[in-house]
Amino acid sequence: MSLSEPPGRQLLKADLFGTVSLDVERSIVERDTRRARWWLALLARRLARREFRALRALDGLAGVPRALSFEGGVLTRGFIAGQAMHRARPQDPAYFHAALRLVRAMHRRRVAHNDLAKEPNWLVTPAGMPAVVDFQLASVSRRRGRWFRMRAHDDLRHLLKHKRTYCPERLTARERRVLATPSHLSRTWMATGKPVYLFITRRLLGWADREGAGDR
């Protein structure tokens, strides 16, 4: 499988689930699952379809890419310029205030990202504002039930973990309490699911949490 891109396109990411490339002239990003390994092709398409559904639910929300289309295994969305969090290392409290508003706005639309622990999924735009990408694991709920509330709680905890890393002196007492109270879902994941996930992604697939930082 050739990963070369035609003129005017920039390869942002390539892995077993396909490629992510930027059309520089049109300022759009394409996630191409047709270039996934055959044994992951079905899962890659399902994840792309999941991302498209979440982005459509968040249409018009600043700091989230705009969903354009999902056809033939190719997800097309808008491009957001910015640096990944672990490269930009934001220390301005205003960034984290805006990030909290963004996450809460997503939750008001009943979308939980479910992967905000990964720093490459957070961007710092040229204006110093937050943006969120990679909604492949996001969920869109019909109602704000217990399952949704647990996922939303964990989204907030993951954001606050980043704030603790880059701006710890501005954590409030309430935020420290949130950090200290993972949801039942999170505790179960840490005890059972995460060891399996780490074995598959790091040992079998050779991934690291900060890979894909170019996927904007």
Image: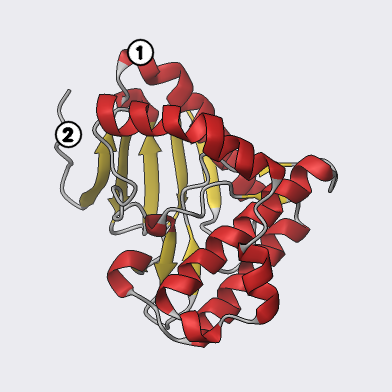
Quadrant in which the N terminus is drawn: top left
Q: Residue at x 62, y 72 (%)?
A: 176
Q: Nearer the viewer, residue 24 or 56?
A: 56
Residue 72 visible to the viewer: no
The x and y percentages for residue 48 are 49, 34
- Looking at the image, residue 126 sits to the left or right of residue 77; the answer is left
The disc label shown at residue 197, or none: none
- Looking at the image, residue 166 sits to the left or right of residue 6; the answer is right
- Check if mark 1's residue and mark 2's residue have beta carbons within 8 Å: no
Q: Mark 1, mark 2: which one is toward the viewer?
A: 1
Quadrant hosting residue 3:
top left
Residue 193 visible to the viewer: yes
Q: Residue at x 69, y 56 (%)?
A: 153
Q: Nearer the viewer, residue 68 or 135?
A: 135
The x and y percentages for residue 212 are 30, 48
Compared to residue 147, the image places residue 47 above or below, namely: above
Compared to residue 117, the image places residue 199 above or below, namely: above
Give amino acid for label 2. Answer: Leu
Q: Nearer the viewer, residue 168 or 107?
A: 168
In the picture of the structure, the residue carrying the numbered disc 1 is 39
In the picture of the structure, the residue carrying the numbered disc 2 is 3
Q: Dot 2: what SS? A: loop
Q: Dot 1: what SS? A: helix
Real-space CA distance between mark 1 and mark 2, rounded to the nearest whole angstrom = 18 Å
